[in-house]
Structure formats: C-alpha cells, structure tokens
Amino acid sequence: MLENKDFYPTPDKLIEKMVEGLNFKMIRTVLEPSAGKGNIVESLQKEAKKVLGSWTEKAGNRGEKRP
C-alpha cells in the first residue's frame, strides 16, 4: 500500500501503450522529468539510447541506470 495518497505510479500496461509504435532508432534521448519511482524510465531504458529522468528513491537518483 502506498503511503502518499497523491502518488499514482504508471501501470505497466499503460507504459506499453505509450511506447507502442515508437521508432527508437530515430529517438536519441528521452526526457522524463517527473519520473516518480521510475516505472517509465526503467521501461524506456530497455530501448532508448539515453534516458534522462528523476525518480524518488532513497538516493534521489537522476537519470542513472537503476541497479
């Protein structure tokens, strides 16, 4: 259960729909400035060459690949 009632993580099925049909050969960089816990960033990192984003983990990572 989420502690913050104002936090709505993007469901995996919605992320799949969002990136469906994108040609990652033509996209060099993706910016996800409001990445919450990183669901979209994590998905994009599988395809895109460079993903810039932030997510609210303990360390407050900024764009680095998640461990």
Image (spheres, rainbow, N blue to C red):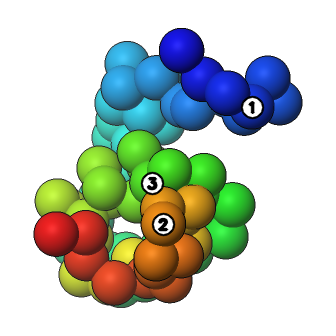
- Residue at horizontal 34 percent and vertical 84 percent from the top: 64
Numbered circles on residues, count = 3
Three-letter amino acid code at disc 2?
Lys
- Circle 1/circle 3 CB separation < 8 Å: no
Residue 34 appears left or right of 18: right
- Give the quarter of the image for residue 24: bottom left
Please rate how many residues cluster around mark 3, counting C-alpha atoms within 10 Å: few if below 14, some from 14 to 19, many from 20.
many
Residue 31 position, x and y percent, is: 56, 74
- Residue at horizontal 53 percent and vertical 76 percent from the top: 60
Q: Is residue 61 visible?
A: yes
- Distance Cα–Cα, label 1 vs label 2: 15 Å
Comparing 49 with 42, the one in front is 42
Q: Which residue is mark 2?
A: 58
Three-letter amino acid code at disc 3?
Gly
Residue 66 appears left or right of 38: left
Q: Is residue 17 visible?
A: no
Dot 3: element: loop
Residue 22 position, x and y percent, is: 36, 51
Dot 2: element: loop
- Distance Cα–Cα, label 3 vs label 2: 12 Å
- Distance Cα–Cα, label 1 vs label 3: 16 Å
Say which label, 1 or 3, has the lower sequence index. Answer: 1
Q: Which residue is mark 3?
A: 38
- Pair 1/3: label in front: 1
- Residue at horizontal 79 percent and vertical 23 percent from the top: 5
Looking at the figure, which quarter contains the N terminus?
A: top right
Q: Which residue is mark 1?
A: 4
Q: Is residue 56 above or below residue 30?
A: above
Please rate how many residues cluster around mark 1, counting C-alpha atoms within 10 Å: few if below 14, some from 14 to 19, many from 20.
few
Residue 21 appears left or right of 15: left
Three-letter amino acid code at disc 1?
Asn
Say which label, 1 or 2, has the lower sequence index. Answer: 1
